[in-house]
Amino acid sequence: SEQIPTRIRLAVAEFQSRETGELVRTWRAGGLIVQFLPKAPERMQADLPGGDAPEGMEVEAGEEDDAWVEAQSLVGTIEDHELTDPAVPAERLLFRLFHERGVRVFSPIQVVDRCSCSREKVEGLLESFSAEEIAESIEDGGIAVTCEFCGRKYAFDPDQFSGGS
């Protein structure tokens, strides 16, 4: 994967309110991710070093783009309450940070906890396997696939694939 300069700012807060005489506690989280994605090749940043450098090894720091330095500085001014307060909409925060460069906000997309796996998708993936890969996938006479996102298990007969034995 390409290693691109990225800054992430996260905050979590507990809110308390009274509903029908009872104290109700809720949690709210907010975050902002900023990445350096220039269109001009001459503005590309050098790849970041992969992982932690060994002790004593000097990692060469390239010259940073002025716009990227500015964006990092602006993100550094965000306070926790700006990310968690429902009275501070994303549009207002983004305008506060980046109004001099222009702000464009897209319609929100609801985040849902739902897996998109299906038997058909897993089967299509297995059909792309070579005969050797199918043979390596067989255990106890069958092929078992577990979705690592939702935990759903799929069982297949290896003979249904071109590489099946």
Image: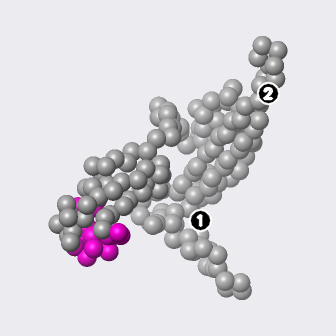
Q: What is the distance, in whole Å, between disc 2 and disc 1 at their CAs?
A: 43 Å
Q: Quadrant of residue 58?
A: bottom right
Q: Name the residue under label 2.
A: 16
Q: Can residue 71 be seen in this view?
A: yes
Say which of marks 2 and 1 sits in front. 2
Asked if residue 31 lies in the magenta stretch, the reply is no
Q: Residue furthest front?
A: 140
* Frontmost residue, 139 versus 26: 139
Circle 2 crowding by C-alpha within 10 Å: few under 14, some 14–19, many from 20: few
Secondary structure beneath disc 2? strand
Residue at point 63%, 52% (across, down) = 8
108 over 40 or under it: above or below:
above
Q: Which amino acid does label 2 sit on?
A: Gln
Residue 133 marker? none
Residue 64: which numbered mark, if any? Answer: 1
Left or right, 75 with respect to 67, comes to right
Quadrant where the C terminus sits is bottom left
Stretch in magenta: 125-140
- For disc 1, the neighbor class at 10 Å (few under 14, some 14 to 19, many from 20) is few
Q: Where does the image place residue 139, in percent across and percent down from the top left?
A: 35, 70
The residue located at (69%, 35%) in the rendering is: 28
Residue 64 percent location from the top left of the image: 59, 65
Foreground residue among 70 and 152: 152
